Amino acid sequence: MILVLLGAPGAGKGTQALRLVERHDLVQLSTGEMLRTAVASGSGIGLEAKEAMEAGQLVSDRIVVGIIAERIALGEGGKGFILDGFPRTLAQAEALDRILVERDLDVDLVVDIAIDDAAITRRITGRFSCVDCGEGYHDEFKRPVIEGVCDGCGGTDFERRPDDNEETVRARLKAYHDQTTPLVAYYQARGVLRQVDGMAGIDDVTRQIDEVLKAA
Ligand code: AMP
């Protein structure tokens, strides 16, 4: 199964991908995570990607397609992949088709998590996560049960993404509308697109996605 999670920044792709990994034995491939790791390691790719990421712009198709192709070539693992944050441009979607066809694979399902622009800034600027286990939190919607202590692992170090600020969010949203929304029509024409209501609560969105998967 090759499942693509589509949706604006802050729609909940990462949160839902983590849940899908646990429930459906799928492997999450997040280009955002891969790029953040590259930036942290100071690799050539990281240095190239850093500026675009900090400005809320998309990293070049060449870099992103390169890292995802490398990862897909390592094999599926589990029952398949969840692509979280990739593709984000038509050129990336076409490159993905070429990578998959070589392996006799295809995009099976694209879940578009729909969310209002107005909700995005509030969602993104409030989020933080545990450094040790990656569990996600939010200033307003999901604080740790014990203040300052991770519910998942008991860790006490938390971090915020440097690109989760209001100015960068505006640029990320523009990139999404200009470059990523054409993918909705692209996958709709292929008959693989399903939309879920991302304005619902986290558990409800998970339930909607489970239903889509069941019907697939
Ligand atoms: P994300 O964690 O998915 O929100 O991605 C964080 C940032 O990484 C984005 O704002 C882009 O700068 C970059 N990025 C992640 N995935 C892609 C992609 N598929 N194409 C281009 N840039 C990407």
Image (cartoon, helix red, strand yellow):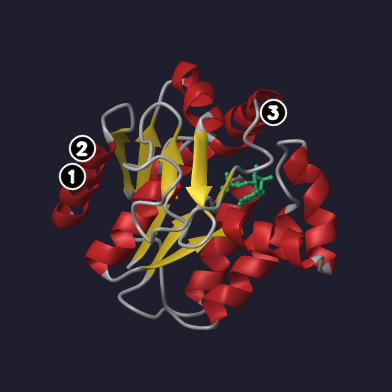
In percent of width and height, residue 22 lies at 28, 65
The answer to whether residue 195 is left or right of residue 65 is left
Indicate left or right for 199 with 65 as reference: left
Q: Residue at x 52, y 63 (%)?
A: 97
CB under 8 Å between callouts 2 and 1? yes
Q: Report the quarter where the N terminus lies.
A: bottom left
Q: Which residue is mark 3?
A: 171
The x, y position of residue 199, in whole percent, is 32, 26
* Secondary structure state at the residue bearing disc 3: helix
Mark 3 surroundings: few (<14), some (14-19) or many (≥20) residues within 10 A: some
Q: Earlier in the sequence, mark 3 or mark 1?
A: 3
The span from disc 3 to disc 1 (Cα, nearest Å) is: 31 Å
Instruction: Reply above or below: 72 against 84.
Output: below
Marks 2/3: CA–CA distance: 29 Å
> Between residues 108 and 111, which one lies in front from this camera angle?
111
Q: Measuring 30% from the left and 75% from the top, which residue is drawn there? A: 79
Tell me: is circle 1 under 8 Å from ligand 1: no
User: CB under 8 Å between callouts 3 and 1?
Assistant: no
Q: Residues within 10 Å of mark 1 (few under 14, many from 20)?
A: few
Looking at the rendered structure, the kind of residue marked 1 is: Arg
Residue plotted at (39% across, 48% down): 15
> Mark 2 vs mark 3: which is more N-terminal?
3
| Up-down relation of residue 18 to residue 199 (above or below) | below
Question: In the image, what residue type sits under mark 3?
Answer: Ala
Instruction: Name the residue that disc number 1 marks.
Output: 207
Mark 2 touching mark 3, by CB under 8 A?
A: no
